[in-house]
Image (tube, grey):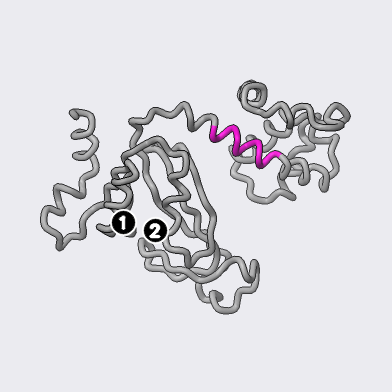
Amino acid sequence: MYSNSKICHHFYQNYCPDSFKHRRNVGLVKVSDESLLVLLLLQAELGMTSQRYFYKVCHLFPCGCLLERSRFNRRARQLIGLVQIIRQAMNSHMSHETIVIIDSLPLLLCQPVRNHRATIFKGLADIGYNASKHLWFYGFKVHMLVTLPGYILNYVVTSASVHDIKMIYGLLEECWQSVILGDLGYLISDFTQDLKQEGYHLWTPFRQNMAGAEEHSDWKVLARSLIIS
């Protein structure tokens, strides 16, 4: 917790806009923004997806006893924009030569057998296909741009039916890294050429029946050639 507190203090003091730091009545709050950030960071580290359960865990800490559940949830939502600002600031320190990966993952809201009967998030979620798992699912899809070690540069959540290609320009917004690794879902020659004109090199594996597939599909070969050049 102490290390998390130091991290949150650093980012809050250096990247939080003054308009947010000194907003009206901020001096009257019982729990500071920094303390809330520490608690939310702890929630992420513990992998807790239930806000209700995590609120109970917060009472183990002195600051967690000072907020009612509804106010805790409102304050946590209020910090979402600040977290995005901090993430963008961290991204700006990332080397332009870093190789990044673009991919998506499914967020299932029910078992596949209930795909056509599920009503949760009706109008927002829908049915999509996950090719890697050969699975039709009902829910959402998370499109992400990450570095090789797993640091998330950007992400977008869409309904399950949205194709990966449609979200790539949104993910690349304010992305200074030019070399991007993608899977077969991004293997569209015209699209690759369009990205090249924008200054991006999108590398995707070849299908097995394509000439030179074995050598080309080893992304480490690409990485070595970039280092040499």
Identity, as a three-letter code, of the amino acid under mark 2: Ile
Which residue is pictured at 31% across the width and 56% down the height?
191
Q: What quarter of the picture does the C terminus occupy? A: top left
> How far separated are the C-alphas under marks 2 and 1?
9 Å
- Vertical placement of residue 23 versus 47, above or below: above
* Label 1 Cα crowd, 10 Å radius (few <14 / some 14-19 / many 20+): few
Which sits in the foreground, 9 or 179? 179
Residue 29 visible in the snapshot: no
Is 48 on the left-hand or right-hand side of 36?
left
* Label 2 Cα crowd, 10 Å radius (few <14 / some 14-19 / many 20+): some
- Vertical placement of residue 209 versus 222, above or below: below
Outermost residue to the front: 197
Which residue in the protein does label 1 denote?
191
Dominant secondary structure of the magenta stretch?
helix
Q: Tell me which numbered mark, 2 or 1, is placed earlier along the sequence.
A: 2
Give how far across and how far down residue 162 sits, in percent: 47, 64
Identity, as a three-letter code, of the amino acid under mark 1: Phe
Which residue in the protein does label 2 denote?
165
Is 141 on the left-hand or right-hand side of 14?
left
Residue 80 drawn in magenta: yes
- Vertical placement of residue 54 versus 21, above or below: below
Q: Secondary structure at mark 1?
A: helix
Is 197 on the left-hand or right-hand side of 43?
left
Residue 171 visible in the snapshot: yes
Question: Magenta part of the protein: which range?
Answer: 79-88
Give how far across and how far down residue 224 sits, in percent: 20, 33
Q: Are marks 2 and 1 in contact (CB under 8 Å)?
A: yes
Which residue is pictured at 33% across the width and 30% down the height?
97
